[in-house]
Image (tube, rainbow, N blue to C red):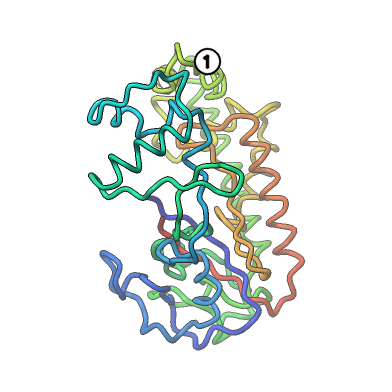
């Protein structure tokens, strides 16, 4: 379970200056370990925008084919049907009809599993009411990112800003009208930090043996070379071991693995990352997640996809009118 930064765009108002605002199941209502939610009526526009993506929201029944994409013998229940109920049909002779007959007869009444059904063209499916658009089980405006946005000097008294609880000067906010937020300042600040990170990384790297990037190990993964072994080998390199869990982990990942990696490229990447967050919720109601390759490191395909997401999200946000609201939402899933 993770917390993700979602940039939500709103074309109508968030009522009142007091933030952060909580969503259904947000801290302060019925989620764990929270004390700073609101009474549920403070941010109708934000709540309305987030509501379609509630993981607990039931939808009308629909056919879910997710678990039926492989051959019948690979269906998760086959091993239990063999071990517990004596299914004897050989793997290469199993059909979905045979699996469904045994599953619906034995596992459904025994374990309360949902039955396997078939559509009009003979494809097996489970009937589901799970929200296919689900992205969060609780959320909070701001939360871990309550000071995410820089505020323009002339807009620090704007009552529409969602300010951190301990805000003294109004220089940072969890959200507000785009025209009151200083997005360029965020990007320039990220660029300055990136320059310092690159120099610090080069100093540390000069003290340790050279290392290979994660993609050199990821490409070795196969049935004969488990991913865990690849991760262990990557992490065993002295440079990676020394920096993986430090604030230089991101710059190390870039420096070791980005094609043509260089200081200027890293600075531009960090600048492009400064605003979009891990997901963008558009005015049109589209939730767009940034590509994610895992917690170990990047590979060129993921890095390229991330770059495309950042370019799209920055262009979308920059094109919005100044009156559109931007809110940094801490979404848990």
Q: Residue 19, can we see it? A: yes
Give the residue displayed 39% in from the left and 22% down from the top: 228
In-image side of 205 versus 38 (left or right): right
Image-quadrant location for residue 144: bottom left
Give the residue displayed 50% in from the left and 50% down from the top: 64
Q: Which residue extends farthest top?
A: 224
**Above or below: residue 158 compared with residue 216:** below
In x, y percent, where is residue 227?
44, 22
Image-quadrant location for residue 176: bottom right
Q: Residue 172, can we see it? A: no
Quarter of the picture holding the C terminus? bottom left
In x, y percent, where is residue 235?
41, 23
Crowding at dot 1, Cα within 10 Å, few <14 / some 14-19 / many 20+, comes out as some
How many marks are shown on the rendered structure? Answer: 1
Image-quadrant location for residue 83: top left
In this view, the residue in front, 80 or 153, is 80
**Above or below: residue 311 compared with residue 328:** above
In x, y percent, where is residue 42?
45, 85
In-image side of 330 versus 310 (left or right): left
Q: Which residue is mark 1?
A: 220
In this view, the residue in front, 253 or 227, is 227
Give the residue displayed 68% in from the left and 37% down from the top: 304
**Above or below: residue 264 compared with residue 146:** above
In-image side of 204 versus 31 (left or right): right
Which secondary structure, mark 1?
loop
In x, y percent, where is residue 318?
73, 64
């Amino acid at each position: 379970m993770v917390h993700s930064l979602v940039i939500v765009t709103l074309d109508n108002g968030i009522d009142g200056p007091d933030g952060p605002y909580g969503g259904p199941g947000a801290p302060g209502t019925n989620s764990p370990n929270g004390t700073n939610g609101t009474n549920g009526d403070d941010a109708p526009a934000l709540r309305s925008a987030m509501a379609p993506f509630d993981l607990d929201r039931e939808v009308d029944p629909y056919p879910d084919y997710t678990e039926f994409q492989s051959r019948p013998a690979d269906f998760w229940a086959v091993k239990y049907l063999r071990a517990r109920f004596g299914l004897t049909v050989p793997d290469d002779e199993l059909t979905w009809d045979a699996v469904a007959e045994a599953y619906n007869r034995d596992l459904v009444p025994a374990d309360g599993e949902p039955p396997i059904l078939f559509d009009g063209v003979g494809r097996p499916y489970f009937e589901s009411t799970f929200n296919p658009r689900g992205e969060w089980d609780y959320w909070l405006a701001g939360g871990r990112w309550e000071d995410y946005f820089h505020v323009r000097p002339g807009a620090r008294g704007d009552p529409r800003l969602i300010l951190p609880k301990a805000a003294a000067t109004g220089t940072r906010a969890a959200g507000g009208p785009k025209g009151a937020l200083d997005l360029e300042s965020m990007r320039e600040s990220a660029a300055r930090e990136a320059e310092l990170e690159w120099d610090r990384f080069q100093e540390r790297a000069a003290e340790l043996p050279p290392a290979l990037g994660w993609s050199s190990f990821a490409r070795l993964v196969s049935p004969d070379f488990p991913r865990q072994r690849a991760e262990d080998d990557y992490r065993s390199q002295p440079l990676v071991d020394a920096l993986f869990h430090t604030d230089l982990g991101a710059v190390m990942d870039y420096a070791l693995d980005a094609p043509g990696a260089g200081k200027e490229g890293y600075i531009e990447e960090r600048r492009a990352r400064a605003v979009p967050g891990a997901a963008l919720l558009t005015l049109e109601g589209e939730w767009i997640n940034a590509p994610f390759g895992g917690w170990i490191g990047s590979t060129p395909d993921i890095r390229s996809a991330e770059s495309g997401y950042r370019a799209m999200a920055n262009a979308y946000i920059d094109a919005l009118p100044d009156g559109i609201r931007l809110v940094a939402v801490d979404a848990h899933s």
